[in-house]
Amino acid sequence: VTLVDETIGAQLILSYTIYNERPVITRNARLVNTSNQELRIEKIASMQLDLTKHDYDVISVPGQYALERQPERQELRRGITEFSSRRNSSSHHMNPFVALVDKNTDEFQGNALGVLLVYSGNHQFTLEKDQIDQIRLITGINDYNFEWVLEPGKDFQTPEAIMGFSQCGLNGMSQVFHKLLRDRVARGKYQYADRPIVINNWEATFFDFDDKKLDQIIDEAKPLGIEMFVLDDGWFGHRNDDNSSLGDWFVNQDKLTGGLKRVADRTHEHCMKFGLWFEPEMISVDSKLYKEHPDYALHEPNRGMTLSRNQLVLDFSRKEVVDNIYNQMCLILDKVPLDYIKWDFNRNLTEVFSSAADAEHQGEVSHRYVLGLYDLMERLVTRYPNILFEGCSGGGGRFDAGILYYMPQSWPSDDTDAVERLKIQYGTSLTYPISSMTAHVSVSPNQQTGRSTSFKMRGDVAMSGVFGYELDLADLTEEDRQMVKEQIKFYKAHRHLIQYGDFIRLESPFDSNTVAWEFVSPDKSEALLFMFKQLHTNRFEINNTKMAGLDPTIDYHDEMTDKTYGGDELMNVGLFRDPTHTGDFTSEVHYFKGK
Ligand code: GLA
């Protein structure tokens, strides 16, 4: 749809993609300056949706560091309601997604219309209910600090917004988004590939490692069945804590005397893949890069700079800055055989001011930063198509569809506590597919919460995503070591079902002490049921979990208990939890094969 403004000389091109076989419409807008004068864009949305009088609830997805994506539901009342981020990232505190739902909509029934913005920067969702109860939803780049100068003949492209609809409640809506994001947003070699089981050294060593320590982890990992070793933060520059070296992407010779290639080769000799951590968008004041190019950091002239995690952000609105990091990364990637990169982004942007732009163009810097980021990602995924990229941002601070386009998986949260993860993974699944969500078993008591949970519970929660371990394998007891082997064997047998099957939420950790979810193969011939209990209580609790999405006309054999149930029975009566499971934080997993 092309709209023409003859007065100022502009065209607004509204593009719609209407899918034949999906309840999805995507939209974006492009503004073209057809005049012979500069135009200044102060606000430009990706889409506007007007709905007639109706009572809706709105679901948003706020969160915080180490507690990301905790959905909230509220009645949409008269006036303007806004959900947004002004942190120059999609952010921990508000994911770029909302859903409008009927009053009676729950996980299984009722209308649910989700809107997701495919963007990793400042976003804005504005909902207005007017005097006659009509509703208008507008979403796009946040107008905060935004101003774009559009020269004659030039155009401005807004990010895409995805609308997904279901009459079968929130689970129905989530499945629409899961499939669309998997099929049409994620891409590359790993789009549908089974993702490797990882051991990451971060929570085991933090910055304190050397060749010997890494070799120990690699040697321990192989016999357990782990498939990839990831070397996290601290391998570059002279980085021994978080005060230095970001921007200096060359090996830390003091720690890795044999260089990175030696670690990669050793990992490969053990028939495991090798991965490496980068934080490409950042710069430490104590770095070679800062000494050479202090203007590369975003900052306002003649004013102080705000450090966060002791670091500053590079000005990715400038091509030469992006080029510098690209060239440094290529030097490593051309030499070291890497299979995976964890791409971190550990602070938000402040002082969003570019030394290279004049006063008139400072309002463009925040969006140009995101375009610079996408440019770097595009160049790297194109040049290194065999590398699996994983996004990360102080945990899950940039878990969005823009990143998913380049990186088929992301780290949802630094909080690896199994109980808190129930909520984080549940909330993340409202929009994002399981194949995009990584989850690791870490030590107990948990380092973020101090809570103790069993190895089994930690494994069952982490196995509900793209699985891995993040602990010191050398510290495992013999019993835990056995458990790791079993968990890995189980995960390998079922990972395709978990990563690419239909995910169904059954009992919510936000509403109930018992939590359950399920993975069903598209042909309904197999299903995996995960049941968790948070606190134990002697009060009588509903003890049967009703499954969903099965074939009611066939029988399912529970391979764990060797019992057989009708599909209709599992869905209408449900499976009773093991009453002998006393104690807090317990879990049960059942694998059903249809016959
Ligand atoms: C962030 C990530 C962690 C780890 C550290 C390293 O906090 O979320 O997983 O990589 O950075 O500094």
Image (tube, helix red, strand yellow):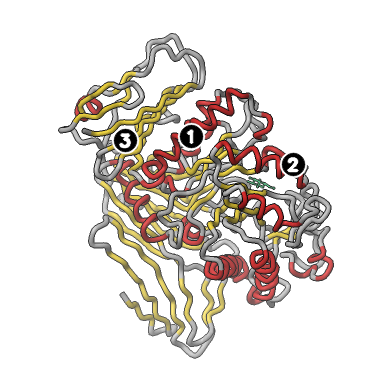
Of the pair 407 and 285, the residue shown nearer to us = 407
Is residue 367 shown to the viewer in this render?
Answer: no
Up-down relation of residue 194 to residue 141 (above or below):
above
Indicate which disc, 3 or 1, sits on the residue closer to the N terminus: 1
Residue 582 x/y as whole percent: 47, 13
Q: Please, what is the three-letter code of the amino acid marked with disc 2?
A: Lys
Asked which secondary structure carries label 3, the reply is strand
Cα distance between the residues tagged 1 and 2: 34 Å
Q: Nearer the N terminus, badge 2 or badge 3?
A: 2
Q: Which residue is under mark 2? A: 213
Q: Which mark is residue 423?
A: 1
Image coordinates of residue 203 in percent, x first then y, are 67, 38
- Please rate how many residues cluster around mark 3, counting C-alpha atoms within 10 Å: few if below 14, some from 14 to 19, many from 20: many
**289 or 99: which is nearer to us?**
289
84 left or right, relative to 258: left
Relative to residue 531, is residue 43 depicted above or below? Answer: below
* Residue 545 showing in the rendered view: yes
- Circle number at residue 527: 3
Does 70 sit left or right of 257 as displayed? left
Q: CA distance from mark 2 to mark 3?
A: 40 Å
Residue 333: where, in percent of width, then height? 64, 64
The kind of residue tagged 1 is Lys
